Amino acid sequence: MSRCLLILLSLVLLALSATSTVYEPLPSLREQQKIASEWVNLRTNVVIPKLLEEHKVEMWILSMREYNEDPVFWGLTNPTSTFSARRRTLYVFYRSLKTGEFKKYEFIDNTEQVWTDLTAILYETNPASIVLNIDEKGNNFADGLHAGEAEALLKKLPWTYWMRVQRQPLLATQFIATRVEGQLEIYKKMMRIVHQVIREGFSTRVITPGKTTPNDVIWFFRDRIQSLNMTTWFQPSVDIQRYNPSTNLVETHSGNTPFEYGDFIWTDFGTTFLGLNTDTQHNGYILHPTETSAPIGLQRGLTHHSNQIQDILLREIKPRLTGNQILATTLAQMRALNISGTVYCHPIGDYGHAAGTLIGMTNLQDGVPVKGDIPVFENMWFSIELQANVEVPEWGGQVVNFRQEEDVYLGGDGGVWWVVGRQSELILVGESSGLGKSGESKIKKGKVSLVKQG
Ligand SMILES: *[C@@H]1O[C@H](CO)[C@@H](O)[C@H](O)[C@H]1NC(C)=O
Ligand SMILES: *[C@@H]1O[C@H](CO)[C@@H](O)[C@H](O)[C@H]1NC(C)=O
């Protein structure tokens, strides 16, 4: 009896999987709380003492008021402790440079008592240096002490300690950039789901040429991730590059223009879950009913141009190099290989555009002031974002834009790895197999060949 039921159940599941994408479940709210608490624990008790030691700082004070948080705050709180800063919220971290003794304090108060308490800590620990999150140069993540709050705090600091106040923008930057144990596991799940959602959106289940529009796919993405308990940090983009043989031009379309057979389609799509953010750009092609593959020129644009820029970047990204150094050597190698394109990679994780160095920006290919001079840290993560301009022979030799974005992480050894893989084949809309065997079958997994230093 139970065996019959099992067989029946398997048949039902099989039938279901043939018609709909099966997504892996994410942790429940209750499980999320446990996971996030452990991350806060590691960040507070492991990452902060390590950073204070590295930057030779004895005290770090974060002060903020309700709903006016320092960007560092979100790495120090978890889904049940505090949903936002309350009253006046003060975090004080102290580590003795001599003994390594580490102490942390948290105050949530709306009276003058908080300053009395802070002063008591100062007299007790007598820190040689005190960092406040003030930075006017472009390190936005290190400027979390709001102007009025800085005035209030500095008025209350005894003058001996006032003299010891410093700025160290790398403290906040590196705190936000540093990935802790366990985050990658969740991030990989998110990324597998993202790749699957894009494949579902770029399939005949969602796209009917002549009828469906880029806006429809955008709202499909929004609805789908909501049903999977994820949100997003930006409105997704979907657009079309379409060859018009009568004018011999490549047209771009978006919004409410329906897709057509032969369109080269693209999306920029990100998700948010458990305080982490992803950022992905993939490309697809809408097959004519008579076609079984995309024009070779379109496939080669990906494999011979944008994939190649990705390979160069992954070899060039190394801890302690700055984003500007990596940008310069990457662009030089692209020129040597006659690859035309631009590079604009950003850190990811706590924020969509997270803390750390920038490797180019769309409008800054000669280097990015301030942020481009920050070094790469171990255990951080990046969104590898770039585009190649490629002449496509089948499209009258006209230039097509290959925009790719895929997230990587740096290991503790400085090695650079794709989170789940990168796109190296166009997603084909109208492929007889519909969605393909599994959402990921076309995405290469694993480590990218690394050229080791020395
Ligand atoms: C989304 O959350 C609801 C409520 O917690 C849960 O029942 C459902 O299984 C979740 N869905 C996924 C795909 O994880
Ligand atoms: C470099 O690429 C351009 C554009 O595709 C092409 O016209 C030119 O012949 C290439 N040059 C070399 C040396 O391969």
Image (cartoon, rainbow, N blue to C red):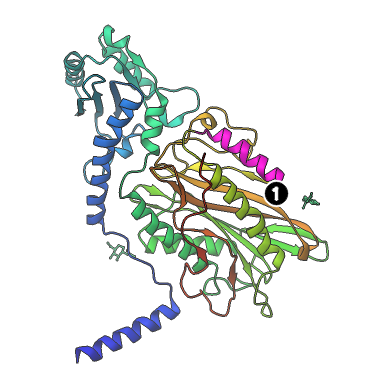
Q: Is residue 336 magenta?
A: yes
Q: Is residue 383 above or below residue 60?
A: below
Closer to the camera in the image, 243 or 195: 195
Give coordinates of residue 203: x percent, y percent. Answer: 54, 71
Taking the spot 41% from the left edge, 26% from the top edge, the residue there is 169
Q: Which amino acid, mark 1?
A: Ile
Taking the spot 50% from the left edge, 23% from the top edge, the residue there is 137
Which residues are the magenta region?
321-337
Residue 149 relative to residue 426: left or right = left
What residue did someone put label 1 on? 339
Within 8 Å of ligand 2, the CB of disc 1?
A: no
Answer with the quarter of the image where residue 364 lies. top right
Q: Is residue 236 visible?
A: no
Residue 134 relative to residue 260: left or right = left
The local crowd at label 1, few if under 14, some if 14 to 19, many if 20 or more residues have their Cα within 10 Å, is: some
Q: In this view, does 127 lie above or below 440?
A: above
Q: Can you say which quadrant of the picture contains the N terminus? A: bottom left
Seen as rendered, the residue at the extreme top is 159
Residue 132 relative to residue 219: left or right = left
Q: Is the magenta stretch mostly helix, strand or loop?
A: helix
Answer with the quarter of the image where residue 264 lies. bottom right
Give coordinates of residue 233: x percent, y percent. Answer: 44, 48
The local secondary structure at tag 1 comes to: loop
Closer to the camera in the image, 66 or 30: 30
